[in-house]
Image (tube, rainbow, N blue to C red):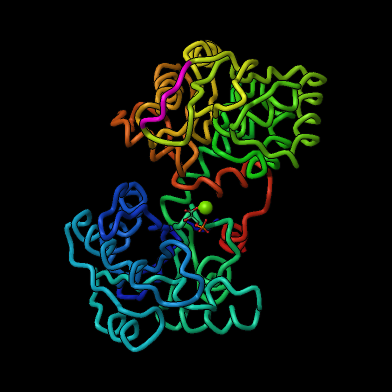
Amino acid sequence: MRTLDDLDVKGRRVLVRADLNVPLDGETITDDGRIRASVPTIKALTGAGAKVVVCAHLGRPKGRPNPALSLKPVAERLSELLGDDVAFATDVVGDSAQGVADALEEGQIALLENLRFEAGEESKDEAERGAFAEKLAGLAELYVGDGFGAVHRKHASVYDVPRLLPHAAGKLIVAELEVLRRLTEDTERPYVVVLGGAKVSDKLGVIANLLAKVDRLLIGGGMAYTFLKAQGYEVGKSLLQEDQLDQVRGFLNEAAERGVDLVLPVDVLAATGFAEDAPHDVVEATAIPADREGLDIGPKTRELFAGKLADAKTIFWNGPMGVFEFDAFSGGTRAVAEALIGADALTVVGGGDSAAAVRKFGLPEDGFSHISTGGGASLEYLEGKTLPGLAALED
Ligand code: 3PG
Ligand code: MG
């Protein structure tokens, strides 16, 4: 894969695909991690005299302009972080984009409006996607792929544009891949993976692939209740994916056959409802009352999981252990984050909610070896899938 060192960018227009898909509360960015992660590549390019045109998506506007998902607030934050002006185009490939791109001088930066305001970006129709990719590619002479969080999407800006322009991988993608490779090749053992989050169905592929690789698999969060149910326990009103029970039984059997230590919660915080202030008690995971729902792992489980992480040499964690957005149910997720910080291991936090949780708790980011900017992307990488955005950069 070519990197920035392989591109001669001086005086040339470079289209950078970044992942600036940050959580917003109105126009307020609640976690700017992905914007910060995009800075090193942009700085390297401006430093080398490029004219930088950044493109990115925000949310899922489904191919139509939606003012609530404008990248404008992101342009402002990016500008603050870069300490440099960022010109903002109010469309993606229209007159504004062309004008802004044409006006760039060496070392200057522009951000295009949300790519997903254009139907061509995500289209499954190759011709429609291709036509949009042509227009996007027309804004620049070179392409740099750096939106790691979106490399699992076969979208025009991720997959088609690099086939139209000389291209290279940016610093973020290079850094992410360096770490993820260490989770798949010559992994130092014990190798422990912690998975959480609401749905088992989102994690099927990764569990299937990891059972052949890990020493221990710790399961918390909403998905744990389907595992508990598969073992024959009642889970009350907790999240449950009935249609995944057979699959999960298969995983439990396979773990036993392979000698993988698959660890489930032994106690949970069982609440009367899904609310910040819902009354709740600690109950055994095998005795969740019929009218309660588990919203976090309990204290004995936190200790159990911490013990399973203490001697690990490699740890990957994806997905919260409970409803960490509610303070009362954030303790389990915090405990796992702290156990990673305490471990003398390669510790990787896989994007999305787990990364947001780390920052919400105010834990030191340098307490982890790596906090990925890609949730879905890092999971699909660990599933062993071919990621369209990486394949396109390799060609
Ligand atoms: C993400 O947040 O997962 C990435 O930015 C990709 O966005 P998407 O899941 O909406 O495709
Ligand atoms: Mg996603």
Q: How many marks?
A: 0
Q: Quadrant of residue 290?
A: top right
Query: Hey, which quadrant is residue 370 in on the image?
Result: top left
- What residue lies at 48% left-to-right and 62% top-to-bottom? 168
Q: Is residue 231 above or below residue 123?
A: above
| Front one among 228 and 321 | 228
Q: Is 171 colored magenta in this rendering? A: no
Residue 279 among magenta residues: yes
- Residue in the foreground of this view, choosing between 393 and 293: 293
State whether residue 235 is above or below residue 306.
below
In the displayed orientation, state which residue is furthest to the front: 291
- Quadrant of image for the N terminus: bottom right
User: Looking at the image, is 229 positioned above or below residue 91?
Assistant: above
Q: Is residue 348 in view?
A: no
- Residue 165, visible in the rendered structure: yes
Which segment did they paint magenta?
Answer: 277-281
